[in-house]
Amino acid sequence: MSMITDEHIAYISRDLHYRGIVEEHIQHEMLDHLCEQVDANMTKGQRFIDAYEAALISLGYSEGLLKTQSLIIKSEHSNSLTMLHNYVTVALRNLSRQKIYTLINVFGLAVGLAACLVIGLYIVQEFQFDSHHEYADRIYRIDAHAKIGVNEFDMTYRSAVEAKDLQETFEEIEATVRFRQMGSYLVKTAEGNDNVKESNVIWSEGTFFKVFSVPVLEGNAATALSQPHGVAISKRMADKYYSGKSAVGQPIILDNARYGIVSAVFEDMPATSHFHFDIIIAFNGDWPIAREAASTDYLTENFITYILLKPGADARALGEKLPRFIKQHVGDALARAMGGDFSFDKFLEQGNRYSITLRPLRDIHLHSNLKGEFEPNGSISYVYVIAAVGIVILLIACINFVNLSTARANTRAREVGIRKAMGSLRIHLIRQFLTESLLVSSAGFLIALIMAWLFLPWFNHLAQRDLNIPWASATFIVIILMSTISVGVVAGLYPAFVLSAFNPAKVLKGERIRTSGISAFRNALVVGQLGLTVLFTVVTLAIMQQLRFMQHKNLGYEKDHVIIIHDTYALRPNNVNPFKNEVLNLQGVSTGTVSGYVPVEIENAGRNNNTFWEEGKEPTGENLVTFQRWSGDHDYIKTFGMKLLAGRDFSKDIKTDDQAVIINESAARQFGMKDPVGQRIVKFDVGTQGQEQQQKWTIIGVISDFHFTTMKEAILPLGIFLGNTDGSVSFRYKTDNPKELIAQMENVWKRLAPNQPFNYSFMENDFANMYQAEERLVKIFTLFSAMAIIIACLGLFALASFVAQQRTREIGIRKALGATVESILLLLLKDFGKLVLVAFIVFSPVAYFAVSSWLSSYAYNPGIGPSLYVIPAIIISTIAAAAVLVQSIRAATANPVASLRNE
Amino acid sequence: MQPQAMATETNDQHSSELLKGTLQIIILKLLSDNNSMYGYEITQRVRELSDDTIVLTEGSLYPTLHRLEAEGLLKTETVQMGKRIRKYYSLTRQGKKSATTKVDEFASFVRTMSQVLNIKVASAT
């Protein structure tokens, strides 16, 4: 029936394209129309060529066709909604025509945005800390800063009496609340029950619920902490210990000794709080801490004090009055203690300092890192680093976007030329290109949201947070929409203007568009992108190296094969030594020691500083040495394997060892002693009647310095004294099966300390825990630098493919003239190689600066070696070369006949 | 932009001036009588109905179709026909309403004109 054949149709289709019908939908419609007409003509007996000629007459040949096309486009644009529809249709068509390009663009953007989104949520939460308190803007913490002799203190600890005097002195203070940390407690609800160890326990007073907005679910907030032996507990605790009944009024037994009554149940404190108390014990009553809270001694500083200002009170003005307050109270107390002609002014003149400042509640989380924080706080510099990481990743993703779009400029030049020749206004073209980039950015955002959602639980685990994507938040949705639009517009703007600025006459004549400016810009962007990747990789490597350094550095003692049994005060009063001796009898245990401190940071092990001077010298600022006073038994040094440099270890046969001390090298250095063994050191002490007295110790040995805290800190002076502090018992073992050994130890424990929790740890694990922050940092940085490398390489891959495409003819000619595949590959690689090189040269100093400033926060670090640069160089150039090669090999191995015929 | 009805002027064909403005009505009316039509079909049907006196040119027909589509009076459907793609036009709900009123308006216009010019025409619609 139909006279027209597929060849005819193909011929007409080609002819239409040749005559300049470029709009796909118009071409389809014209083709159909012409075919019908030609078919009708052929049915009347005409040959195809005549039939087609006749049909073209009625369409008006090229001129008529182009005019029709232009009229159609104009009528379609007569309605803005249709115009938008049209832009979108055309954009989708363009995007789907270059699937790889679109995929890389969308995926690269999505990865970058997902990273940014997660980082954004994290940072927002960092800044929201403690803002849930109703009076957050009126609550301040009292921080203390002191320099006495060579020792400096920045701490939260204040005397018990100061809060009361502050409130009496300054009328702008509405209320004060004090805290006292005593570490963890053993908790049980009735005699005979098993004890459970609780860590988030604090002592406080009646004003707590008034100052801080912690909702009380049960009990009376006003009196809960004013009644003697009152204990307020969190909902979590109430559910744990008193499930199924009302907790208020129930007994709670702390450390087997303090019989409290639950007086209130409060809501669990949110993650964005700088403290998370589960149990708050009232100061009131006859307990030792309560007596301490009533002390009037200004020189015993154990309490953390918060003040609530009256509405409208000026915190700065109050801060300026504090030095006088300190002089009056602390100065007097010091004068009384020192006696003689001591005066506070003279004390300050000698270069000493003593001041208190007000720290706004909401600043604590990000800006405060003093001694005596409730929990490890965040850090503003960490927030800046993370924010920078997010911005850099977004930047890399956006650079990709711009690069790929401008790289496409050449391939779309013809389209632009024809569109302009047909009367498309420049603004139409800009809109068209912006629509395309907006579509890509929308898709990118959508995928990014999904990726972030999938990835958040994992990030939460890593960063120890409870972040959620706030789907229901209007602000969040507005921000996402705005970002989608601005990323789309910003990323699409440059290509839009560059492409739309082409001169149609030149483009259509086949003249090469001058793109040197564009490609220089593009190269600069690629260098920037690669450089940022270099930065990331170097920093990641530096963190890894530091972590490895800290984990493997010689510590000065043997951390492996040591089991620490914690909270051995539960064995009181008589069972500590029997426990040690019974465990020592077990198979596989070589030595053991009862001690107050162990040379690793563990929970509840606040260090204790004392100030000493050398006997025979005046105790002035210069001669005073503050060092840590550790107590251990005769086996301490043997068990931990510290090296004795001079003198001897404690001996059971020498009675005077009660008055002996073994110091470390640092202490000897600080005392300025050449031969310390045999010398004596002195310390002030308060006697049983409260009178001043001096206490003396003989140095019997010097041990080599060992790391007892993180390597951020320099090794401090330290002395080991014989003593019966029973914080923990540590055992060195020789067996390969510590599990069985622990089971045996637990049996001994259960017999000697019935109903008490048996807590143990391996010293090497405690050691590893000190570097959890660094390990998290390594994980986070590895993750983000992997992302950066992926995005950058995707970009490089796509860019290489465009370059190879553009140089198809050149490659064809070179090959036809006898160039080998290898020489062409080298040619293509050389260009990208240059970019990688420039990126390295430009960004290495930046990386050096970043790494060295980070390393400077560690007293012990391995420094910056060449491997820090060589390894990233190898990684990045290998990946970049691979990305480029994949594309280039295809171009280089193509048959030159095919590529040249195409032109 | 008004579409131009550019009929090629040959013998027995109406001048383009007269056809100006009527193209829309012709398309709407044709589509309200026939469910859906494609471009070539419309030109042929008009030719048949007008006994070859009205020949729609592609240059006027297609822009008008696209404009009506843009205005929401027409909807389209494409059908793959072997190597070709055919685009069928049909009236939207709004298009149907518009077709009725426009044809009515035109009929009353013709009546008025015939009255003014004192000529007799066969009744429209």
Image: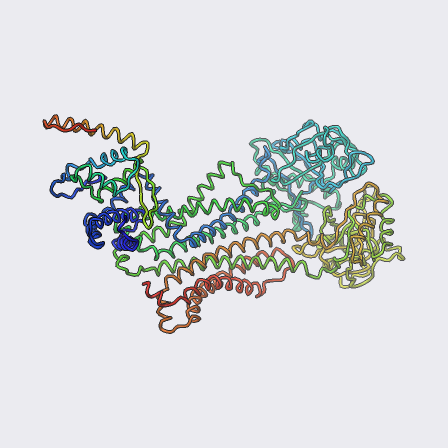
Residue A425 shows up from this direction: no
Viewer-nearest residue: A226 or A572: A572
Viewer-nearest residue: B12 or B48: B48
State the scheme by which the image is colored: rainbow
Q: Residue A633: image x %, image y %?
A: 83, 53
Q: Which picture quadrant has residue A10?
A: bottom left
Q: Residue furthest bottom?
A: A818
Q: Residue A708: image x %, image y %?
A: 72, 55
Q: Is residue A622 above or below residue B54?
A: below
Q: Which picture quadrant has residue A858?
A: bottom right
Question: Residue at horizontal 71%, vertical 31%?
Answer: A225
Question: Residue at horizontal 40%, vertical 58%?
Answer: A522
Q: Is residue B44 left or right of residue A903?
A: left
Q: Is residue B81 above or below residue A239?
A: below
The C terminus of chain A: image quadrant: bottom left
Q: Residue A689: image x %, image y %?
A: 83, 41
Q: Is residue A814 above or below residue A787?
A: below
Q: Is residue A153 left or right of residue A453?
A: right
Q: Residue furthest left?
A: B118
Q: Residue A232: image x %, image y %?
A: 71, 32
Residue A610 shows up from this direction: yes
